[in-house]
């Protein structure tokens, strides 16, 4: 994945979260996040294009799609307006550029 082609900045974080896959919730850790997606450390494999929901602290849950999986890492694309997510992410990562 080429970070230089991203339209939204990414912020490195280490935030405990929960991911819902097929109605079951799993613990995970967000390792970076942007207004359009997130990279997770997740101790399970999830199929590509799988529809999931992520609970981030007290924020969410947010609908997302699995874009890639590699070992214990999973990439999600949020299914929400990027501006909405960006404003909420300022809570998670205070240096994240908001509105």
Image (cartoon, rainbow, N blue to C red):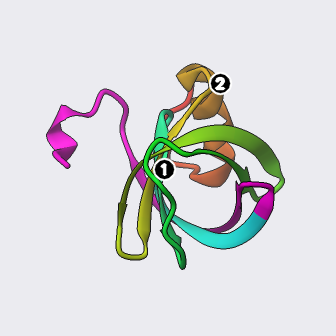
Dot 1, crowdedness within 10 Å: few (<14), some or many (≥20)?
many
Q: Does residue 7 belong to the magenta stretch? A: yes
Q: Quadrant of the C terminus?
A: top right
Q: Residue at image x 78%, y 47%?
A: 59
Residue at the disc numbered 1: 38
Which of the two residues, 40 or 95, is positioned nearer the viewer here?
40
Label 2 secondary element: helix
Dot 2, crowdedness within 10 Å: few (<14), some or many (≥20)?
few
Residue 53 x %, y %:
70, 47
Residue 46 falls left or right of residue 62: left
Residue at the disc numbered 2: 84
Q: Earlier in the sequence, mark 1 or mark 2?
A: 1
Which of the two residues, 96 or 68, is positioned nearer the viewer here?
68
Q: Residue at image x 43%, y 49%?
A: 48
Residue 32 x %, y %:
44, 57
* Spatial CA span between label 1 and label 2: 15 Å
Residue 86 falls left or right of residue 66: right
Q: Does residue 17 belong to the magenta stretch? A: yes
Residue 77 x %, y %:
48, 38
Q: Residue at image x 69%, y 65%?
A: 17
Q: Nearer the viewer, mark 1 or mark 2?
A: 1
Write down the region rendered in magenta.
Answer: 1-24
Residue 2 x %, y %:
16, 45
């Amino acid at each position: 994945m080429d970070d230089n082609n991203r339209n939204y900045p990414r912020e490195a974080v280490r935030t405990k979260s929960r991911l819902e896959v097929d109605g079951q919730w799993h613990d995970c850790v967000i390792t970076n996040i942007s207004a359009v997606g997130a990279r997770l450390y997740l101790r399970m494999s999830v199929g590509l294009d799988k529809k999931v929901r992520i609970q981030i602290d007290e924020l969410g849950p947010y609908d997302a799609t699995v874009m890639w999986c590699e070992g214990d890492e999973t990439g999600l694309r949020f299914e929400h307006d990027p501006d909405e997510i960006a404003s909420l992410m300022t809570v998670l990562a205070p240096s994240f550029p908001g509105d």
